[in-house]
Image (cartoon, rainbow, N blue to C red):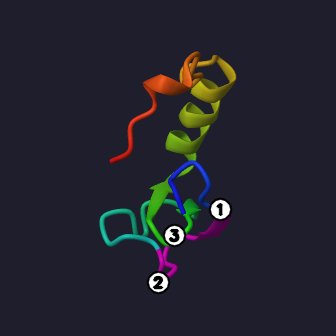
């Protein structure tokens, strides 16, 4: 499955949840976990999540040409 086809899940968990990476653990009451298939995990505290969603709404992540996509 390609990165574009991977299932993405968002979970909100307590800051001390075992899935939260050690450097984020306990930093906030809630952590937003973005799980991309079996490929990876992103963890956001409230301020980071708010900034990320603001960037999405402002079009910071819009891709005009599919040829611009790169697979890492």
The residue nearer to you, when weighing 22 against 2, is 2
| Left or right of residue 22: residue 47 | right
The reply to whether dot 1 and dot 2 touch (C-beta < 8 Å) is: no
Q: Residues within 10 Å of mark 2 (few under 14, many from 20)?
A: few
- Residue numbers of the magenta segment: 10-19
Front position among marks 1 and 3: 1
Residue 62: percent from the left, percent from the top?
59, 22
Residue 19: percent from the left, percent from the top?
48, 78
The disc placed on residue 58 is: none
Residue highlighted by disc 3? 15
The reply to whether dot 1 and dot 3 touch (C-beta < 8 Å) is: no
Residue highlighted by disc 1? 7
Element marked by disc 2: loop
Residue highlighted by disc 2? 18
Q: Residues within 10 Å of mark 3 (few under 14, many from 20)?
A: many
The residue nearer to you, when weighing 4 against 52, is 4
Residue 51: percent from the left, percent from the top?
55, 32
Q: Residue furthest bottom?
A: 18
Tell me the residue at 66%/66% (across/down): 11
């Amino acid at each position: 499955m390609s990165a574009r086809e991977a299932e993405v899940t968002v979970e909100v968990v307590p800051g001390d949840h075992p899935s939260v990476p050690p450097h984020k653990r306990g930093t906030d009451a809630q952590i937003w976990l973005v799980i991309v298939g079996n490929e990876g995990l992103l963890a956001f505290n409230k301020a980071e999540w708010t900034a990320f969603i603001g960037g999405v709404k402002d079009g910071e992540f819009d891709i005009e040409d599919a040829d611009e996509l790169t697979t890492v």
